[in-house]
Image (cartoon, rainbow, N blue to C red):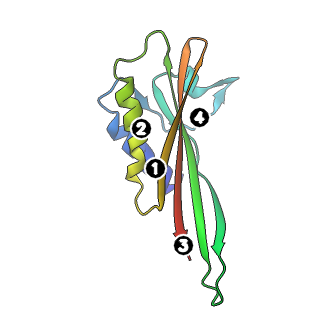
Amino acid sequence: MSAIRDALLANVTTNISSTSCGVSSELPWAQGDTPLYEKNMKKFYLSEESSATTQLFATIDRNDVFQKERSLTGFITVDAKNQPNDIDTVVAAVINSRLAIADQSVNECAVAVDTEEDRITYTFEYRFVTITN
């Protein structure tokens, strides 16, 4: 596991501990054709970290400047007909968990909402960028 994933999971766990939703440390893989976050509703799942490094500036003294971007995707699914009363609190807490990751040039979380059949899935796209040389 990555340090960023561990910190995000710990922060989300703390932030939503008094809500109607929980956190799973399992990866959001499928059981059969169904993702676990759809099967186990009201549980937050977080993917593994993916990263990419890009050279921003090449310097004469070979002290080049690089941008490292890390991204993770989180999921939580709820019943569309019987949504938890505190779903807005849960979504805000999951988004704000991005602030637990320190020393980042960019620290973002975008959320997308998808309604399918009788389920609402919230997808959280975390993005963290550091600049180094």
Number of other residues with Cα within 10 Å of mark 3, as a class: few under 14, some 14 to 19, many 20 or more: few
Q: Look at label 4 and name its amino acid.
A: Pro
Q: Most extreme residue toward the bottom, as rendered?
A: 61
**Secondary structure at numbered mark 3:** strand
| Disc sitting over residue 19 in the figure | none
Q: What is the CA distance from the residue labelled 3 to the residue labelled 2?
A: 28 Å
| Disc sitting over residue 132 in the figure | 3
**Secondary structure at numbered mark 4:** loop
Q: Position of residue 10 (x, y in %)?
A: 39, 45
Mark 3 or mark 2, which has the lower sequence index?
A: 2
**Secondary structure at numbered mark 1:** helix
- Within the image, what quadrant is residue 117 found in? top right
Is there CB contact under 8 Å for labels 3 and 2? Answer: no
Q: What is the CA distance from the residue labelled 1 to the residue labelled 3?
A: 22 Å
Name the residue carrying label 4.
28
**Secondary structure at numbered mark 2:** helix
Q: Position of residue 89 (x, y in %)?
A: 34, 29
Front tag of 2 and 4: 2
Placement of the C terminus among the 4 image quadrants: bottom right
Q: What is the CA distance from the residue labelled 2 to the residue labelled 4?
A: 16 Å
In this rendering, is residue 103 above or below 24?
below
Mark 4 or mark 3, which has the lower sequence index?
A: 4
Q: Look at label 1 and name its amino acid.
A: Asp
Number of other residues with Cα within 10 Å of mark 2, as a class: few under 14, some 14 to 19, many 20 or more: many
Mark 2 or mark 4, which has the lower sequence index?
A: 4
What residue is shown at x 42% (from left), y 55% (from top)? 101
| Disc sitting over residue 6 in the figure | 1
Name the residue carrying label 2.
94
What residue is shown at x 32% (from left), y 27% (from top)? 19
Closest to the observer, 66 or 75: 66
Mark 1 or mark 4, which has the lower sequence index?
A: 1
Q: What is the CA distance from the residue labelled 2 to the residue labelled 1?
A: 14 Å
